[in-house]
Amino acid sequence: MKNVSLKKRLLLGSILICTLITLCISLYQISRLQQREQELLQREIASFEQSAMASIREAVWNYDWSMVKTVISSQVNPLLTYIEICDSEREQCVEAGIKGDNPHREHFLNIDYQKSFQGPRIEVGTAYLQLCDQPFGELFNRYILTEFLTNGLGVFGVAVAIFLLFYLGAIQRIVTVANYTRRIDLTAVESLPPLTLDNHRSTLDEVDLLADSINGLIERMKEEFSRRKQLEYQLNHAHKMEALGTLAGGVAHDFNNILTAMLGYVQLCYNSAEEGSKTQSRLEQVLMAGDRAAALIAQIMVFSRKSENHTQKLCLAEIVTEALDLVQASWPKTIEIETDLDDSLWISGDAGQLHQVLLNLATNSGYALAETGGKITVSLTERVVTALDAELLDIDPGRYAYLTFCDDGPGIPEKIRGRVFDPFFTTKETGKGTGMGLAVVHGIVQAHAGEIILDPDNGCGCCFTLYFPRVEAEKKESGTLPYNIGTAEGGTEHLLLVDDDPVVIGMGQDMLRSLGYRVTICDQPTQALKLLLERDDIDLLITDLTMPEMTGTELAAELRRHRTDIPVILYTGNVDSLDSSFLADGIVDQLLKKPFTVKELSLVVRQALDLP
């Protein structure tokens, strides 16, 4: 594309616009001239009617045509070029002037005579007037050149003055801006100097504002490049955390299988031991230790969970306790934790995300107290939020679980307190913080219809207050042990148990046989599918989720394509990661979470077998 300078474009545009303006002005003046001539013609006609018509009327009534001739001859002039007076029968006509073929305007009048004041008016004749009327085209040809030259001098003179002022005041500075932007090198934008127009004026115009905008854009580009470096670092950190989460999830899965087998066999031994014996008491302690191990695995599962949002009713006090227990092991002994938690407060939310909220808050407090030591105080109570408080907090009125998380560290300086929830904002050293912790916390809390604020009246240290809408508590069955080891209901049906782990499948077989069931085991999903399709005596399929060749859900879906009469139980160590559509679509009938007790297994099996 051909380059045309702004100066040439402005010059050509000015000439074109000035020509159009001059032409418009000239046409307007010619039209005004024609309008004035029309007004003169109207006046001439009016003057003729007022001055000559009375004499002509009297003379025509008296048939004094010489008088008519004299009167109309005196009225002929350059505007009124021809007059003709005739009687009513047009038998007698008198004319004056020259009747020409040039452009003219015609005007007709009736000559009426009234004998008396109240008598009737009698038409005695007619008058024909011809007036000189120049059309617009003739006026245009006659005056356009002189009008155009006269008006053009003024218009082009003003345009030249404006052009010179604009060129000196704007175009030269715009060229400076263009040369600056042309030299911008994005690979070296961080060292790019600001744009200066080198003027000493006291006012700013659009070019100055453009220069300021470019400088602002350059500054934002510099910030964006710095942020990009931060994001690259954060991405690398996220990849490391993802790899660590994957490793933790894999370890937790394998350990969960081992724990399932261990606890399963311990429960079988517990059930077969003498009631009230030392052996049963010792096995009870093993089961309680296993419960703590299962809780630890659940925390590792939360850490390794990706982004699933599984909303359920949760006891917030339990979430807080689990998170604090998880981080306290890595803190020095100089950091003390004091809690006052109301375990009757339940909320609706995602356990993994709430763990992340508590872990972030605890990590920040632990970082602040790492060198000097101190105390972290966590309190959980109920608070009723009124309409006035709700408007200030930007939440709905109602009953809330009110969580305060405070430490007596150095606190947050006043000048940055308003930015603590901003993404990428951090006061930590490079490599010790991404600036996303509190931003993520803020987003999670708001996603749970709550609010988090930094308490400005804490006095010392740092204190966050969190609001979560309260819900009714989830009903739990009472029991003396974490694992409900009670009387289990069995049966005599034929069950197929599928699991690739030989320890787990052996434990499951023993559990089911202890309940009276006939059990066939299989460690290969494809072989299990073949048995299900060939045999008619299998009443129930129990399968693990994670297996080689085919997952438990794939095995259930393939079975449903051929047979719908066999119920399916799927067990896994991470039920939250399972797609709920498998239950909704009827592919899986029951879910069982590892590790499980004999009673839990018996209940799930009976529920699946007794389905209508």
Image (tube, rainbow, N blue to C red):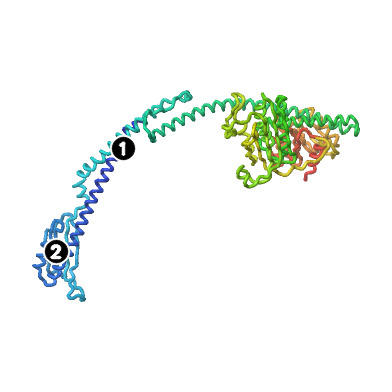
**Secondary structure found at label 2:** strand
The percent position of residue 268, horizontal first and vertical second, equals 85, 32
Q: Name the residue nearer the viewer: 325 or 299.
A: 325
Front tag of 2 and 1: 1
Regarding residue 547, the answer to whether it shows in the image is: no
Q: Which residue is mark 2?
A: 84
Asked which quadrant contains residue 75, the reply is bottom left
What label does residue 339 carry, if any? none
Does residue 390 appear to the left or right of 37 in the view shown? right
Amino acid of disc 1: Gly
Badge 1: residue crowd in 10 Å (few <14, some 14–19, many ≥20): few
Give the distance between the C-alpha atoms of the residues marked 2 and 1, in whole angstroms.
57 Å
Q: Residue at x 10, y 70 (%)?
A: 64
Q: Residue at x 80, y 41 (%)?
A: 477
Which residue is most to the left?
66
Q: How many marks?
A: 2
**Secondary structure found at label 1:** helix
Badge 2: residue crowd in 10 Å (few <14, some 14–19, many ≥20): some
Q: Residue at x 47, y 23 (%)?
A: 191
Amino acid of disc 2: Glu
What label does residue 13 carry, if any? 1
The percent position of residue 568, horizontal first and vertical second, equals 75, 38
Identify the image quadrant of the N terminus. top left
The percent position of residue 476, horizontal first and vertical second, equals 78, 41
The percent position of residue 105, horizontal first and vertical second, equals 19, 58
Does residue 576 appear to the left or right of 603 in the view shown? left
Question: Eyeballing the image, is 70 above or below 406?
Answer: below
Asked which quadrant contains residue 152, the reply is top left
Q: Are marks 2 and 1 in contact (CB under 8 Å)?
A: no
Does residue 586 appear to the left or right of 54 in the view shown? right
Q: Name the residue nearer the viewer: 484 or 86.
A: 484
Mark nearer the N terminus (2 vs 1):
1
